[in-house]
Amino acid sequence: MEPRRCVLVSRSVTNGEAPQHGGEPDVEPEGVPHLDATDEDVSIGGAGLAAAAIELGRVDELRMFRNPIVVGGGTPFLPPVTEDLQRGVHIRKGTSPMTVRTVNTEAGRLSGDHTDGVARFLGIPYAAAPAGERRFAPPGPAERWAGTRNAPGYGATAPQPSLHPAHANLAPLIGPGWVTGDGDYLNLNVWTPDPGTSGLPVMVYVHGGGFMIGSGAAPAFDGTSFARDGVVLVTVNYRLGAEGFLALSGEVANTNIGLRDQIAALRWVRDNIAGFGGNPDNVTVFGESAGGTSVAFLLHSPPAAGLFRRAIVQSGHDEMARRLELTEELTKALAARLGTSPTTEAFRAFSASDLLRAQAALLRNEPHPDLRDGNGVDPGHRRALFLPTTGDDVLPDPVGVPSTHSRGVDLLIGTTLEEANLGFGADQFAAFDALDAVAELAATYPDAEALLERHGLHDPAVTPAHALTAAYTDLMFRSPSRRAARRHPGPTYVYEFAWRSPLHGAAHGLDVPFVFDTTQACRGLIGDDAPGALTQAMHQAWLDFATHGDPGWPTYDDARKAMRFDAGPHLCEDTAPEGTGAEYLS
């Protein structure tokens, strides 16, 4: 097999050019107004790691090919590969000889690589390519293929803005960015110890990234360790940003498109995973950040009922959603930026790059759309523009009510101790005084000053920045996560990740490499001295939960016992407040 080469083709999206994608036009459609977003003025804030990572002025196209590509008629260009990314690639140096394994799926036969006891089938389409009439529409069935389809490398990824160069250390958690490839980015990746066996537990991972960036191809999500330990591990791509989370008017259901994609992937797992050695009746769906929030809402979704037996929600919950009318307001605001109407037909006339530019302008330029509900609360707190929508067939119930669709589903849910230390504006907050901190939070939360005071706003020993990040940690993550645990109708276990990394403390997203046993791929984020005992404890707990529904500690009841994952993991009384923000649930 010839080695793959990485080719980086970078085009500015502010000069009318756009990456080739799914047959979309290369030039701006007539009548597209100029968007007030430039290469220098589009680094934006988004939820979670997306807040620190996104630079929307450029759309970088990273393609994986078996042979080098000549760019612009010159010699092949190969971008530098960071040490962390090199550690995280799925083909490892010094491993045993590779063999080829084949499996049958409903769409056709697949071949994958088998090395060191783990078989990998990557870039498998689980739905039809979302191009043409399939854009802004529910996912359709994957097209069948003749013969055997080779699946040795990751496939295309969803349209998304690129990582800001200053935050390249986040790449192991975000992935390669927008990989246009063949445009068939509704694909998934499977790692299995033996496709010839049967009955193995299955874990399906939904990536995070503020519903705007990310993919299942990130090095931190490499499924080798899970497969090595007897699990069939699946990672999933889904539609992001405007492609996946608007409310356009049209003839087809077009709300919660990204969640519909995830449900389609779970149906693919149900129908095909036995061919990879997995048990379709023992599926655990799990995710972190936007992925964790997705999982929390899948527990409330009638179309997702019965597709999984267990769920793990990492740094997510079931309160970060907007009512349908607010998503419609967001859609109208984006349509106004594009100079068009908020309909499916109108939006299909614009390329994915057009939408990325409009997203950038919407976030960076005044006036911002007012996405606060009747209580004055924006559940995304201006960090997440796109969120799931309640009030449709996917999520018919309002937030804050127990699910009637997940009785009997085991739940493991938790947060990190210092979520907002990374990716929520902490660098910007460093220069804030007390008035700045209050004004920042009051823009999306009415009782800002009282909440900040509870976190030491006027304490001489506490900086306004620290008070603000602590308030966001509780308001956006710890408190709603614990309320979700209380509401869940099935057995529930709670954890908190409390190990403080040298650079970011116990920040958002830093638990992920410990769960996947991929800390070596993330040393730029977590440092060189990640405790091996912590990796072993978290990885094993996730394995045990996926296998038989018990992570190794008691369920979360009135005693409020939670597993604290630190250098020395131990069971303790949970310290997260449950009430922060509860008064505004409606």
Image (cartoon, helix red, strand yellow):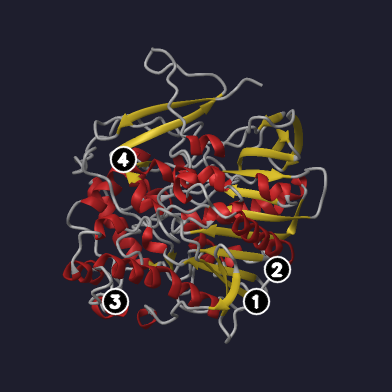
The amino acid beneath tag 3 is Gly
Is the C-beta separation of discs 1 and 4 under 8 Å? no
**Real-space Cα distance between discs 4 and 3?**
44 Å
Q: Residue furthest bottom?
A: 558
CB under 8 Å between discs 4 and 3: no
Residue occupied by mark 2: 549
Secondary structure of the residue carrying tag 4 is helix
Q: Residues within 10 Å of mark 4 (few under 14, many from 20)?
A: many
Q: How many numbered dots are placed on residues in this image?
A: 4
| Residue at the disc numbered 4 | 354
Contact (CB < 8 A) between labels 2 and 1? yes
Q: Earlier in the sequence, mark 1 or mark 4?
A: 4
Drawn side of residue 134 relative to residue 146, left or right: left
Label 2 crowd bin: few (<14), some (14–19), many (20+), radius 10 Å: many
Q: In the displayed structure, would residue 1 be above or below residue 500?
A: above
Single out the mark in the foreground, 1 or 4: 1
Q: Tell me the crowding category of disc 1: few under 14, some 14 to 19, or many 20 or more residues within 10 angstroms, Cα based.
A: some
Q: Residue furthest top?
A: 74
Q: Can residue 105 be seen from the camera position used here?
A: yes
Residue 329 spot, x, y in % from top left: 29, 62
Relative to 173, is 34 on the left or the right?
left
Residue 491 circle label: 1
Residue type at numbered disc 2? Gly
Labelled pair 2, 3 in contact (Cβ < 8 Å): no
Circle number at residue 456: 3
Foreground: disc 4 or disc 3 = 3
